[in-house]
Image: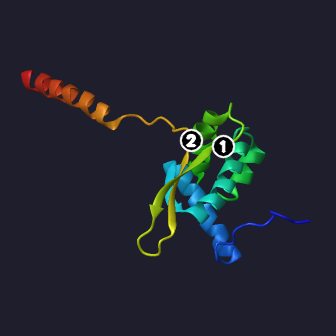
Amino acid sequence: MKHKIGFNALNRSSAHRKALKRNMVTSLFRYERIETTKAKALEVRKMAEKMITRAKVDNVANRRQIARDIYDEAIVAKLFTEIAPLFVERKGGYTRVLKTGNRLGDAAEMVILELVEKTSKPEKKAEKKASKPAKKAEKKDKEEK
């Protein structure tokens, strides 16, 4: 019996569906959070979880497998160097789906698909505040000379 083997075709041709999933997975890894419909999120989640599992082991074969679907080399590098190391101890469940309600136009159920762990980003505000006094001190030193 072939129960529960199928997938959601998302009412698209195979080429369109493949391109959609590739673009959405790339966006998920770039921004670490995307808002989309529930049906798309559940399909993209399957692809993203398999990629993260493969990226836990950094070798040429795995990089090539993932580069088949993610065309942006910077995102592939981010996946292997920043995202996958966060999940080394975790055996699965790298993403979460949060319901946000229905879309106004067509009442489609909208969700947020995000990574469970967040990569650390440097604080821009702290850098700007630290750099302003240094610039003022440099100007005063130049004026005194």
Within 10 angstroms of label 2, few (less than 14), some, or many (20 or more) residues?
some
Residue 126 is situated, as x and y percent measured from the top left of the image, at: 30, 31
Residue 141 visible here: yes
The x and y percentages for residue 66 are 70, 52
Q: Estimate the spatial distance between the alpha carbons at disc 1 and disc 2, rounded to whole Å.
A: 8 Å
Give the numbered dot on residue 116: 2
Q: Nearer the viewer, residue 59 or 52?
A: 52
> Which circle's residue, 1 or 2, is located before the other in the chain?
1
Residue that appears at 60% across and 34% down: 86
Q: Residue at x 78, y 47 (%)?
A: 61
The quadrant of the image that shows the N terminus is: bottom right
The disc label shown at residue 104, or none? none
Vertical order, 3 against 93 (above or below): below
Q: In the rendered structure, which amino acid carries the disc numbered 2?
A: Val
Q: Quadrant of residue 11?
A: bottom right
Which residue is label 1 attached to? 93
Mark 1 Cα-neighbour bin, 10 Å: few <14, some 14–19, many ≥20: few
